[in-house]
Image (cartoon, rainbow, N blue to C red):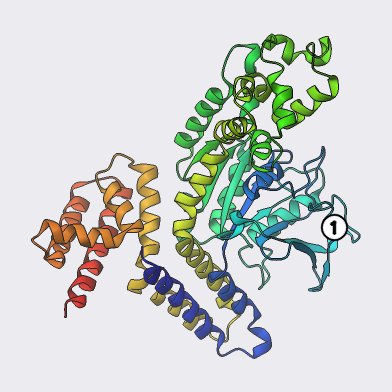
Amino acid sequence: MSVADRRRVLEVVDRLCEDLARPLPAAERAPFEAVRETLHAPLRVAVVGRVKAGKSTLVNALVGRRVAPTAAGECTQVVTWYTYGSPDRAEVHLRDGSTRPLFLENGAVPAGLDVPVAEVRRIVVHLQAGALRDLTLIDTPGLATLTSENEDATRRALLGDGSSTAAAGDADALLFAIREAERQDDFEFLRDFHRASGSLAATAVNALCVLTQADLFGSGDLSGGDPFAIAAEVAQRIAVEHPTDFSAVVPVSGLMAQTARTGLVSESLTRSLRQLAEADPVLLQLWRQVGPPEGVSEAEMTTLWEAVGPYGVVAGREHAGSGAAALRTWLGERSGVDAVDDAVRRQLLPRAHLIKAIRALSVLSTLASRLPDPDDARSRLEAAQLDPDLHPLAELRALRLLSAHAPTSPLLRRLETVVDDPARVSEEAGRGDRGDAATALRRASAYAVGEASRTVVPAEIEAARVLARSYQLLARRVAGSRV
């Protein structure tokens, strides 16, 4: 989709938001202005999961800095936003609407605050980090926390609290961290998030699953097995069993990823790891009981263990022999963080405008009841969703339903191309019909209608209908451009 097409989607929703707020006194327009602001801000991606699922470690790896606290216990007690900004700085946003500066200790968020956690809405950290140019990462206290206040903070941030300023929470999309195995209440929360994101997002369009601590699956090298292979099997099972919850399930070792991405792979660490090249793998796993191998001190072993974990120590030795750069590359690839980055940049960022528009429409639907004429507001919302410029929202929903329920459908590839590159569809249609793209697109529309009449799978029927409409709109655009 071109930049102009993306801009049109956001402009339609922005204009609707402005029109709905116009009858209100200026003092009551703040919720609508907040919605408009989110439309033009970077995509907000929250990292959520049960306590100690490795969320903050993953955030550090994705940001490329050790900025989130990761010590033992519940480190993240407050919802924390990491966003692009210069110079590096942070502030505490209190629930009464005021803010105060927060000193970053050695570039990291301090573990404690000088105000009660219950009074804090969020911490906002501005960093000159390239990874944050296109998105804002939101670290959360998590689910099943030791204190109800911490879990309540997560739920308010991601599901909203029913107030006009947080009608559907602050996040546009999720990275859902699962440590060992999924639990029922995890998916109950996830479905609450999908509902809060709007009816069009009640599929996997805005959620990725990250299977954390993949280097600890199984019995590691003591069994001679590959923990990442075991984690990959679990990830595949989750993807198959929960196709409408996640658009991808990616195994990752947050610890290895953090070390690879945050400058911790030094020549000294690499040299210590290289010293273990001939050590017995089983004795390495048991070094705390039997002592460190000859030539390596206990302090060096502790540093290695804390940096890359037992799997990283055993499997990383051969890569350490080629130097720090080679070890860093291996850790990035093997940890799975590169795959997480790829999923975010392939499945979330190219569709950020659609995800944000879906969320905005959901918030506006909630705010409609507070307007002088709620019925008129709801009618405007329904009419807006029929606007041809917002048809890509229906395309995205149909694509996710089709991927989940009919992944072998011949319509899948066509719909993917229409969603992500409609200009290419028009170009190929023109080449296939002696340059008359509009005619070819009308024929493609008739084909899609025919497919809808031949199938009994609901998701495929819906995809065919949506695709037919897509071809019709493309044909009109092509024909109009030639007038």
Residue lying at 15% horizontally and 67% vertically, measured from the top left: 438
Where disc 1 sits, the SS reads helix
Residue 71 location (% of width, % of height):
81, 40
Neighbourhood count class around disc 1 (C-alpha, 10 Å): few under 14, some 14–19, many 20 upward: some
Residue lying at 66% horizontally and 25% vertically, measured from the top left: 312
Extreme residue in the right direction: 114
Residue 264 location (% of width, % of height):
71, 38
Q: Is residue 122 above or below residue 232?
A: below
Please give left or right for residue 81 compared with residue 465 in the image: right
451 or 432: which is nearer to us? 432
Residue with the mark numbered 1: 117
Q: Quadrant of the N terminus?
A: bottom left
Please give left or right for residue 237 compared with residue 402 in the image: right
Q: Is residue 40 above or below residue 371?
A: above
Q: Quadrant of the rendered structure where residue 3 is?
A: bottom left
58 or 240: which is nearer to us? 58
Please give left or right for residue 126 compared with residue 40 in the image: right
